[in-house]
Amino acid sequence: MLAAAAIAAAPAVSPGATTPKAAASAGATTSPGASTSAPPSGPTAPIAIQISNTPIGRPVAPGFLGFSFEYPAVREYTGSNSRAINPVLVQLIRDLNPHQSPVLRIGGNSADQTWWPLRGVKRSPGIKNVLNSSWLATTRALAVETGGKLILDLNLKLNSAAEMKAEANAFRTGIGAQNIAALEIGNEPELYPITPFYYQKPNKTPVYPRPRSYNRAAYLGEVTGFAKQLTGFPLAGPATGNIRWLARLPKLFTAEPKLKVVTYHRYPLIRCFTQPGQPGYPTIPNLLSTTSSRDLLVGAGPEIGLAHAHGATFRVDELNSVACKGQLGVSDTFASALWMVDTLFAIARSGVDGVNIHTLPEAIYKPFTFTETNGRWSATVRPEYYGMLLFTEAAPPGSRLLAVPTPASPDLRVRAALTPHGLIHVVVINDSLTTDHTVTLRAPSGAGKTAIVERMVAPGGATATTGVTLAGQGFGTATTTGTLRGPFRVVHLHPVAGQYTIQIPASSAAMVSFAPAATGSRPGPHTGASH
């Protein structure tokens, strides 16, 4: 899906276009993204959008988009043979990180249930995952074959310097310090006083990892003490999903100068502890609200700036649609792909250096599933992954986001990016479940006259769980290569009175790409690597 090549190529047929003439003039398709619950209401009056030359935020960082795996998930994804790990997984990771090194985080709730056996130390009842040399070997192979760097989450619930040091030393020898970006101490420590570590027999009495009095100050004290045992590694933290805990970042930097990656967790909706009708309850309309994408980092701006002022990076190293492993009919639908695109743009605009999409095989929000038969791997790729791919193409590393006025319709989300090669990508998302929209674009000065349109659609619209395509390509029901297949289908647009007109069906997204003008002038400043 190389937009520059497509702009120069011969006109292509738009998937779903009724006639070549209609496709060429308006870039419209039939309504493959319409919701199955109600018929589309038809296009409304055109909505004008002017793309500016003004860059906003920081350039998109290399390794911006990665995954976060729970500890047991690693072997389920890679397989047990370190000399031949799952090649489809490797390719799907590389697809999101062309010409760059991905950052992969291994952690989550399982981090505080994981243990490296230590001679003379009795295993805690809270331990569910025991690491061994074979696990280390496959994890090392994952880093090497993807060219990635790992953030490895250490068990803080045990509150044991000796056990934490043993775990870190195992990572050093079995995975290699050169493959490790940072060690993260604990996972969401704000929950330690209220979430049981295990249940004690015979009455199933809950045992909590910390007393009710445990607070941010106590956590800081623990980090300071444990960090002394973790020599030779940069540190990551506080691995919190609580903005009040994140606000203690100044004291965390003072207490621990080895902190090099600030980590924060975000889920817009939550399946447990909410009821229908509440704002955080998982439904498709709630997921597609601006609150679920653009408000995820509200209040975190000072901490993002503080991290950069200290020479550290800031990563949302655990992100997905619905906490508590997702929600059927929401997390597994095409709505999650539409949400993902806008959310990644929102996070990039905030100045964050990277995002890790959290997954484990039993989660409903998983972006892929794998099967292995006689050493041959295949994957089923879920809708959410397509949203990640669209963002990757629209805003590769080094891209600068461009300012876009808020569209007149609340259904539309519009994002724009200037790539290092001078391409301008405009992504238009129609979050309405029933209403098609017509958009007229005015490109910034310096853009060439011809534009192309790539569409991300699914039969059945927001509720679809299969059949997603991006520029006419897809992974099908299963892939053994991890690469898109099928004809790359785009529509060429030409301006009328300086405007480009395109129809955006309900529950769909489109990317309009402009090359630099023939004179070679570029529409604005650009930095970074090419895509």
Image (tube, helix red, strand yellow):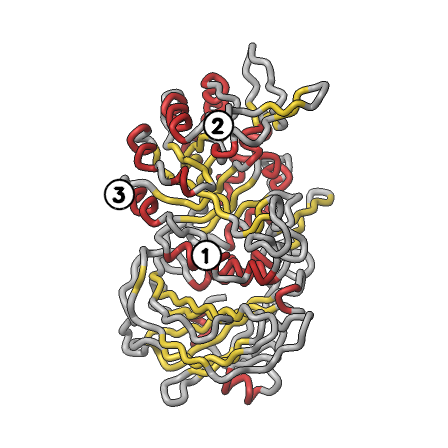
**Residue 219 lies in what quarter of the image?**
top left
In this orientation, does residue 449 appear?
yes
Vertical side of 494 occupied by 144: above or below: above
Which label is found at residue 309?
3
x and y percent of residue 445 in the render? 29, 77
Distance from the alpha carbon under mark 2 to that under mark 3: 29 Å
x and y percent of residue 106 in the render? 52, 37
Left of 238 or right of it: where is 200? right
Image point (41%, 59%), residue name: 396
Image point (59%, 36%), residue name: 83
Q: Which badge, 1 or 2, comes first in the chain's sequence?
A: 2
Distance from the alpha carbon under mark 3 to that under mark 1: 23 Å
Viewer-nearest residue: 1 or 112: 112
Please report contact status of discs 1 and 2: CB closer than 8 Å, yes or no.
Answer: no
Q: Which badge, 2 or 3, comes first in the chain's sequence?
A: 2
- Residue type pointed to by label 1: Leu
- Residue type pointed to by label 3: Ala
Depth check, mark 1 against mark 2: the one in front is 1
- Residue type pointed to by label 2: Phe
| Residue linked to disc 1 | 344
Which label is found at residue 171?
2
Q: Secondary structure at mark 1?
A: helix
Image point (58%, 73%), residue name: 506
